[in-house]
Image (cartoon, rainbow, N blue to C red):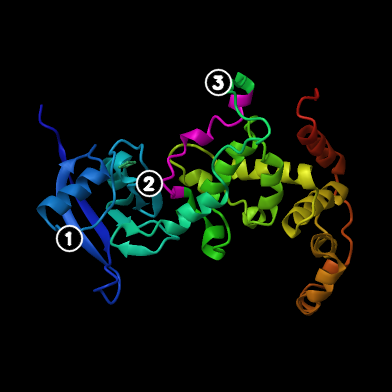
Amino acid sequence: MTETLVKATFDVYRYDPARDPAPRYDRYELELPRHTPLLSALLKIRAEVDPSLTLRYSCRSAICGSCAMQVNSKSRLACETQIGPELDRDGRIVVEPMRNQKVLRDLVVEQEPFWRNYDRIRPHLILDPTKPMPEGKETPMTPAQVDRFMETPRCIACAACYSACPAVEADPAFPGPMALAKLYRFVVDPRDQAHQDRLVRIQTDGLWLCMRCHLCTEACPKDVRPSERIRDLKEMAIAVQGATETGSRHAVGFKENIRERGLLSEMKLVRQTSGLTGLLAQAPQGLRMVRKKPEILKRPHPIEGLDEVEKIYDALDHPEAPP
Ligand code: FES
């Protein structure tokens, strides 16, 4: 049986910083079976139309992570993205390099900062030097212990999360979702002896720069759900060290504010987050806000149905308790 072919239009980002004054998009039109992986289409373009097209790939099986790119504005693995559904949805396929990484040429980006952030979290077990592992013996874990990090080993380090992350874009000091998800994996490993130290260090090493937008979780092709692991790290960091950083104080203050009245008291939250010194430092900006919105100085009245809010907090604080 012969396969039905579809007419596919590819608009591919092209840029060679050594030669081109600016990036451009080159259009290629091919007839291909609907189920063709985008990577195969790009390799066909390179083999038959334009040998200068530059891209990175290796396994062609969604394992190595090297073919990650922006496909119709979403971070995808080119080797597992079939062209048919993309054409049905968008009418054409726009292919661009990953975001938040410098373009080296066409679809190939500089990965050094991504891997540097990974190294920063010390991605290996740290054992107690006074208790070396018994030679030739395994260190078994219970199924419940393994369950705590079942998702993170699925990560293939494709950087889809890093590319989608606005915190990386805003501040290069942010380690990125992949590095933090991997950090979580070691923090909950019962064999690791540095979990407390890891949690204390990360509090001042970018953990609280996460904006909780969850775009990393949406982008991840392996369902690692990095934003949930970052949330877990934040909870564990507060449990170990208390709310000692601006970010953790903000989170705790926010929670207390809503629990108390069901609404934010913005002045109180600034004081809880930054202290009196921080409040004074922000005085000029605060005065401008008060002029525009004088009601922020008033303490909000508790909302109606505050007892329902309390019930939500109770359910979250004690998930095992009967309703
Ligand atoms: S080529 Fe390895 S994940 Fe696509």
Give the residue type that dot 3 points to: Glu
Q: Earlier in the sequence, mark 1 or mark 2?
A: 1
Q: Residue at x 86, y 44 (%)?
A: 306
Q: Nearer the viewer, mark 3 or mark 2?
A: 3
Per the image, is 111 magenta? no
Q: Is residue 4 left or right of residue 120?
A: left
For ligand 1, the image quadrant comes to top left
The quarter holding residue 4 reads: top left
Residue 7 position (above or below residue 205): above
Mark 2 vs ligand 1: CB under 8 Å?
A: no
Give the residue type that dot 2 points to: Arg
Q: Residues within 10 Å of mark 1 (few under 14, many from 20)?
A: few
**Residue for badge 3:** 138
Q: CA distance from mark 1 to mark 2?
A: 22 Å
**Residue for badge 2:** 76
Indicate which disc residue 52 carries: 1
